[in-house]
Amino acid sequence: AADLVGKGAVDDEREAVGEGRRALARGILAPCRRLRSGRASANVPVLPLRKGNRMHTPEMRAAQIDDIRRLPEQLAAARAVGITAPPIYMDSLAKYGAIARGDGDLYLRLPSASSLHRHENIWDHAPGAIVLEEAGGQVSDRHGHPLDFTSGIKMFNNVGIVASNGILHDGVLRALRS
């Protein structure tokens, strides 16, 4: 369910209870509501968004250009599994939470040809992957390999990120292979 109040929410992952969400409203936390991904499709891709206030560095401008270069491949993979809605651009781990809530279906972070040797930071994906998987979604790299958080601070054994509601995952991986 979307955050209709606009105050935000806290994702609460505990092994004993699974993944849940507590909405922030009127200065208090609402009761925890269990999340379930993998239900009827919202038909929405979630794509990365870089914060505009950091675009002043050459590195951030280069990263934004890489994001633009990857867009056609990302949108083609989304269309291959029936997603036709325009993407929602988000920053931070909120992308994983949106899919876990059912507000989005697919998050792709694919390296462009010029950034093949760029590896993701573990802290940018591990918490979100746990939240999404606990809610029934799936997370892998673009080749279908599980994310490897054991290689230090960078994910050296993975290429890109594919996070989905679970229903679309295999179809997206097939589309990326073709």
Image (cartoon, rainbow, N blue to C red):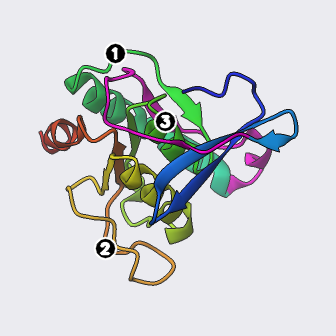
Residue at disc 2, secondary structure: loop
Dot 1 or dot 2, earlier in sequence = 1
Where's residue 67, x and y in %?
49, 41
Q: Amino acid at mark 2?
A: Asn
Give the crowd class for mark 1: few <14, some 14-19, many >=20 residues within 10 Å.
some
Residue sitting nearer the eye, 165 or 12? 12
Position above or below: 121 against 36: below
Q: Amino acid at mark 1?
A: Thr
Q: Which quadrant, please, contains the C terminus?
A: top left
> In the image, what residue occupies the spot 24% across and 20% down?
82
Residue at disc 3, secondary structure: helix
| Residue holding disc 3 | 101
> In the image, what residue occupies the spot 16% across and 36% down?
171
Locate residue 132 relative to residue 91 in the image: left or right.
left
- The span shown in magenta is 30-58
Residue lying at the far top in this picture: please name it: 85
Give the crowd class for mark 3: few <14, some 14-19, many >=20 residues within 10 Å.
many
Alpha carbon separation for disc pair 3 and 2:
28 Å
Residue sitting nearer the eye, 71 or 143? 143
Give the crowd class for mark 2: few <14, some 14-19, many >=20 residues within 10 Å.
some
Dot 3 or dot 2, earlier in sequence = 3
Q: Amino acid at mark 3?
A: Arg
| Residue holding disc 2 | 157
> In the image, what residue occupies the spot 41% across and 15% down?
85
| Residue holding disc 1 | 84
Locate residue 59 relative to residue 38 in the image: left or right.
right
